[in-house]
Amino acid sequence: MEKVLFVDDDANILAGYQRALRKQFRIDIAIGADAALKLIERQGPYAVVVSDMYMPGMNGVQFLSKVKEIAPDTVRIMLTGNPDLRTAIEAVHHGHIFRFLTKPCPPESLAMALEAGIEQYRLITAERDLLEKTLSGSVRMLMDILAMVDPHLFGRAQTLRGYIRSLAQTLQVGDIWKLELAAMLAQIGLVTIPPVVVLKSRAGHSLSEAEQEMLERVPEISHNLLANIPRLEPVARIVLYQNKHFDGSGFPRDTVSGYDIPLGARMLKVLSDMRTLEETNISRKRAFEVMRRREGWYDPRVLEAAAVTFLPISETHQHTETPALAVSVWGLRTGHVLASDVYTADGKLLISAGHRVSEALLERIRNFAQVTGIREPLYVEVTETSRAA
């Protein structure tokens, strides 16, 4: 049976409520707001809380506002011996009450109000349980699909989930479950992309303009899939902006920038790029050096928090960058190590910094230079190979 809590500063009045209603309801009592709040924390949840208005220390409106914070599902009823319009308005707006009753209140009227309050509580909790089951079931289904369709992507998502949990602890961010879900489901839209396109992209092969556009829209596709699931709207927004640069460039092409980008998306951008760079067989320290060179890409606070989280303490604050040498496409040689990302003339990322130039990679860059153009100069690390060139 659901519990009801009566709160008043008069012990005799509380005893009267118990005598009149104990056969119909499971009733607890508390003398004053402070005692009631402790009781709610220790013995809750309560389906209904009935409070007097005028109590010392904390009045009924202040108390019921507090109840809403700590027990949002609990239905709140105000009971007062000095009703006035101002009190009623305050109670409705600040206490978010379900009923406003006046003293003396006949036991049968009070019982009807309690029955209505309990029914309201049942509706609220039933709806929440349904939403939670729908949410967990939907997420589980999406994860099962991801694991079956693309085991590689599923493994990467699991890695990012662990990363974002650690970074959230460093940043002292709440609602970690939303961040973890965003990390796990960020690339769910890839299931709609032809597998051959995904494989070409992972292998570093040339993509047509249409194929590049397909992959660029993966965050939008993922967002649209998630936005239809109850309570996942914030997660869907994180996913939509996962590739957005801090300066506002990147996808989606809108005016959102800086701290207007969801924090989860700013975190995911740093962690995803860190992981992508590591997958090219460069060290984590080197990955952070590369990311620090990408002006305007990342939230500086998040980037440095990630460095604190994932680099040894001795390397965290080392911002010394490897000296770089500017070269043209035709001055690039095998053995060079790229010190900057390589972009096509229309702004598409072709090769990430940190790659050592092989014959195949050199051929690819030169082919793109002839077909679409390459942004120059390119920057390579200063080594014996680059000096000799």
Image (cartoon, rainbow, N blue to C red):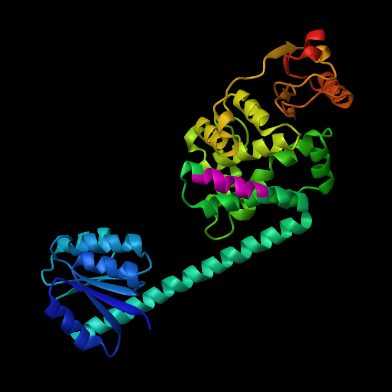
Residue closer to the observer: 56 or 337: 337
Q: Position of residue 125 (x, y in %)?
A: 44, 72
On screen, residue 111 versus residue 288, left or right, reads left
The quadrant of the image that shows the C terminus is top right
| Residue 18, quarter of picture | bottom left
Query: Residue most toward the front?
Result: 314
Left or right placement of residue 171 versus residue 56 in this view: right
Above or below for 283 versus 370: below
- Expressed as whole percent of the image width and height from the top left, the position of residue 362 reads 85, 22
Q: Please say whether residue 104 is visible from this viewpoint.
A: no
For this rendering, which residue is in front, 43 or 109?
Answer: 43
Residue 167 seen from this side: yes
Position of 310 with respect to 68 (left or right) is right
Q: Residue furthest left?
A: 82
Vertical arrangement, residue 281 with respect to residue 92, above or below: above
Quadrant in which the N terminus is drawn: bottom left
> Could you say where residue 43 lies in the image, as x and y percent from the top left?
34, 73
**Is 3 situated above or below 376?**
below
Along the viewing direction, whichever of 386 and 300 lies nearer the viewer? 386
Q: Residue furthest top?
A: 388
**Residue 302 painted magenta:** no
Q: Residue at x 73, y 49 (%)?
A: 153
Q: Which residues are magenta?
A: 159-169
- Residue at x-position 57% and y-position 24%: 318
Image x and y of residue 185, in percent? 64, 52
> For residue 97, what is the image quadrant?
bottom left
Asked whether 162 falls inside the magenta stretch, the response is yes
| Location of residue 200 with respect to 380 vertically, above or below | below
